[in-house]
Amino acid sequence: MIEYRNLRVALLGAGSVGAQVASLLLEHGPELATRAGAGLELVGIAVRDLDAPRTADLPRELFTTDAESLILGADIVIELMGGIEPARTLILQALGSGADVITGNKALLATHGPELFEMAEQVGAQLYYEAAVAGAIPIIRPLRDSLAGDRIKRILGIVNGTTNFILDRMDTAGESLEQALATATDLGYAEKSDPSADIEGFDAAQKTAILASLAFHTTVPLDLVYREGITGVTLAEVEAAKRAGYVVKLLAICERLTDADGVEGVSARVYPALVPRSHPLAAVHGAKNAVFIEAEAAGDLMFYGAGAGGVETASAVLGDLVSAARRHVIGGPGVAESTHANLPILPISHVTTRYQITLSVTDEPGVLASVATLFSEHGVSVEAVTQSVSSSEEGAHPTATLVIGTHEASEAALAATVAALGESAVVSHVTSVLRVEGS
Ligand code: NDP
Ligand code: HSE
């Protein structure tokens, strides 16, 4: 029997993910040791409350509330506490002592990533974070390693399961946003006390910052990620999208752009968008996640699976653990996160995309021409128009709904067009403005 060198593994957190990591590590330890080429000894688990119920049956003697002492002398520290502090300080301490660190903490990486990566680089340690974006789906390692020889053009991601579940219920079951959110809360996807991290797009924005930084070798600060959540999406919009051959998805978009002035930069943005039903992302249902990558040489790639869940996310963490152990066995410094491109982060006004605008107008001669003139005056080219006439009350002007699809236009031009439509005498109201992505 092969005698392996033993690596000391400290686990911070035994909640949804941490408890499953501990359980799988204890259960499959010998097999993981064979894969890693080193024994993986779980030396302790730091928690807040020693008496809190756990989702896995774990030896009580492993538990401690003293996280700082636990990380001393560990070869590998797994941080699954969440939040900024004390996670940030503990990770810095662990890296500072030369330990490799594994984390699933997207909130921390999106806000303090550069500080953590710098510390890892200084001491030659490695920070792993496969679980931080899209749970079980391997996406960090493909971007960092498998696609390191390629150039990424664009990433379109469904990286928040709760909002995908809600939009999918609206699309497939005809539920209103409020009804679908209640269903998501009952099923434990959305947080009862405060679902805003999901439905306002904050969680997706954190993941977008991480993906864009990695894909474009550029630090993308969270506050430069443009963000709109799904709270303004109506059932009427989802149903109209369906009739027009689209589905509404909350997308995380990371894109390499050259703007009108020839400046190359990165756009990182999150918003609900119309996706053609023929696009692979349209087939992502329920709380599942998917990341669609457009690369210069590789072409289109799609990664699909569970974006959350204790045991599913534990798979990504344990993959990182085996990688960290192999690195210890081989020796040498960790590979620093590359930010060599250092591209500017372009504001949303530099983005061009297609739009679908729904208007309620008076149905009389000349209206369509007036509306078309407003688009052309602002340099926005119309691609398609459909009109449906609403029945009108006797004596009142008949009204019509116009759905106008545009060719690619800049956000600035589109915003000016929408403002002009809002002021036009022939437009009763602008019912909806949605971007079209993935076509
Ligand atoms: P939980 O809230 O379920 O668990 C957090 C754990 O950390 C608990 O065991 C808690 O202890 C412990 N903890 C929190 N604060 C402290 C502290 N100050 N000192 C010691 N222990 C502390 O979180 P999750 O397992 O859901 O998530 C962990 C991380 O993984 C987060 O960063 C999250 O974003 C990320 N993640 C989670 C996913 C998921 O599906 N849940 C998916 C992908 C990433 P106690 O139990 O005693 O309260
Ligand atoms: N709240 C997240 C989601 C889970 O709904 O996808 C993990 O990030």
Image: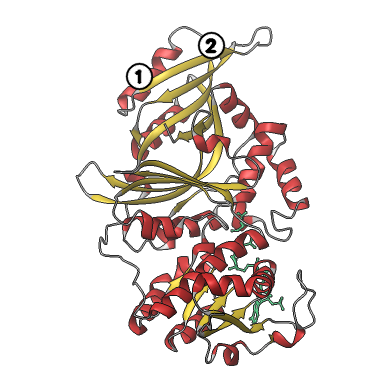
The percent coordinates of residue 208 (x first, y second) are 46, 55
Q: Is residue 179 left or right of residue 165?
A: right
**Is residue 245 something one can see in this rendering?**
yes
Dot 1: element:
helix
> Which residue matches tag 2?
363
Q: Which residue is drawn at 76% across and 51% down?
A: 187
> Which residue matches tag 1?
373
**Is residue 81 something one can see in this rendering?**
no
- Please state which of residues 280 and 111 is positioned toward the viewer in this rendering: 280
Q: Which residue is drawn at 80% across and 82% down?
A: 51
**Mark number displayed over residue 37:** none
What quarter of the picture does the C terminus occupy?
Answer: top left
Picture quadrant of residue 384: top left
* 356 is higher (above) or lower (below) than 325: above
How is the rendered protein coloured?
A: secondary structure
What quarter of the picture does the N terminus occupy?
Answer: bottom right
Q: What distance separates the C-alpha of mark 1 from that of mark 2?
A: 17 Å
Q: Which residue is drawn at 50% across and 8% down?
A: 364
